[in-house]
Amino acid sequence: MTGGSEFPLAEDGRSFICHVDDLEGVKAVDLRSALQSYVEWFWGDPSEGETALLVADVPKEYFDDESPTENVSFHLEADQLYIGVGFTSYEYLDKDVEPDAVNRFEQALTPYLTRKRCILADWQLDQYYTNPCVIDIKVLPSLRGRTLMDLFDLGKDITSLLDAMQRGSLTRQTTLDLLRGGRAEVLIGQPEGPWLDVKSAHYDLSMPSGKISLAQAVARFANAEHGGIVVVGMKGKKVPGGEEIRQICPVPFESGIERKYQTALEQHLYPPPDYLDIETVKINSGMLVLIHIPPQPEELKPFLVHGAIVEGGVEGAFISIVRRRGESSIPTTAAAIHATLAAGRALLRRGQLPDHSS
């Protein structure tokens, strides 16, 4: 092999194998040239043969040509270098039988691959597996300026995204798992929704307006049916039909920021949401702040924000009630508030609720 690395032949005698640590610094174009040379030597005609580079991730001292390999590999076919990804799905997807499977599968991958200058070349069911269903994915990447580690990480991102979408679409929990697992990048191109809101910069907690804005963002999801996630450090953009995530813009790392957010919410949001979780995830040279609001018991609603922003100014004596609908926020109407209060008073009169007013 070339590019400063020597990869041994794998057990099958036709593919090469390397340790994952050896991918760092090896140019993708160098691997393509080396595999082309091997195919020409082995088969005589470069257009006739195929070969691959398999990747093992075991302790380095145990690495050899029989090491178990990862689900991401590199394949040379007709002078093109592809990324191969083997994905295990617990849903049987046969694109020859189920046309809808093609749309769901490609819609899940296309935004991420387009941004990464890649093409979904093909995907096929592994003929030897039916339950679970193993899908062999072939991705054609642009090689310019990329190392093998870049392409390997890309393959792992594909696996993470498809794992998260096993049930047909991203959910609040699977999105949270991706963010916590350092895979925020695969969310770029995905739409915001009724349970996801992104913000590119910290709330200004030195100002009352910033604290109220934070409390309103959390209250929107606390008053909604399915809860939600507020992500500080990602940027969205309006597109036809809603908004989608366009960029990761990590906020500067700040020690103790979780407590500052929590204090602001304690000052401006009542009652405190059950099991609300604020955490940070390191990314690049900064961090993301994740505020996770699980679905709340109906008896705690509505969640009230102490303070409101009216025509750009802060009205500290006001109470605001907001909730999430789709990708936007709507205020709770006066009629709805009155109905809730009236129902509560009626139950108090009948003795079905404890009276905490005294």
Image (cartoon, rainbow, N blue to C red):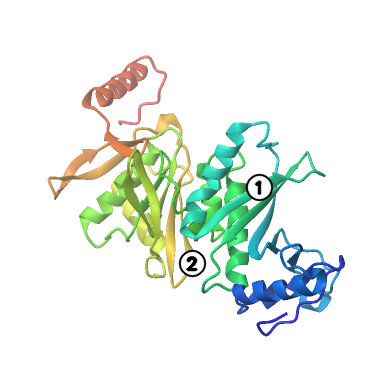
Q: Quadrant of the C terminus?
A: top left
Q: Secondary structure at mark 2?
A: strand
Q: Which quadrant would residue 47 be assigned to in this image? A: bottom right
Q: Amino acid at mark 2?
A: Lys
Looking at this view, is 144 or 285 the one in front? 144
In the image, residue 131 sits, relative to residue 51, either above or below, namely: above
* Side of 325 relative to 147 (left or right): left
Q: Which residue is mark 1?
A: 123
Residue for point 64% across, 31% down: 98
Give residue 10's quadrant in the image.
bottom right
Q: Residue at x 21, y 45 (%)?
A: 307
Please report the residue visible at 31 percent of the width from the left and 51 percent of the height from the top. Answer: 214
Task: Decide if residue 95 is in sight here.
Answer: yes
Q: Residue furthest front?
A: 45
Lateral position of residue 37 relative to residue 227, left or right: right
In the rendered structure, find residue 313 and report the number of the disc placed on it.
none
In terms of image quadrants, where is residue 147? Answer: bottom right
Which secondary structure lies at badge 1? Answer: strand
- Mark 2 surroundings within 10 Å by alpha-carbon count, few (fewer than 14), some (14 through 19), many (20 or more): some
Residue extending furthest bottom? 4
Residue 333 position, x and y percent, is: 24, 27
The amino acid type of the residue labelled 1 equals Trp
> Seen in the image, is 136 located left or right of residue 170?
right
Where does the image place residue 234, in percent across and percent down from the top left? Answer: 39, 57
| Label number found at residue 282 | 2
Where, quadrant-wise, is the N terminus in this rendering? bottom right
Q: Earlier in the sequence, mark 1 or mark 2?
A: 1
Give yes or no for contact between labels 1 and 2 (Cβ–Cβ under 8 Å). Answer: no
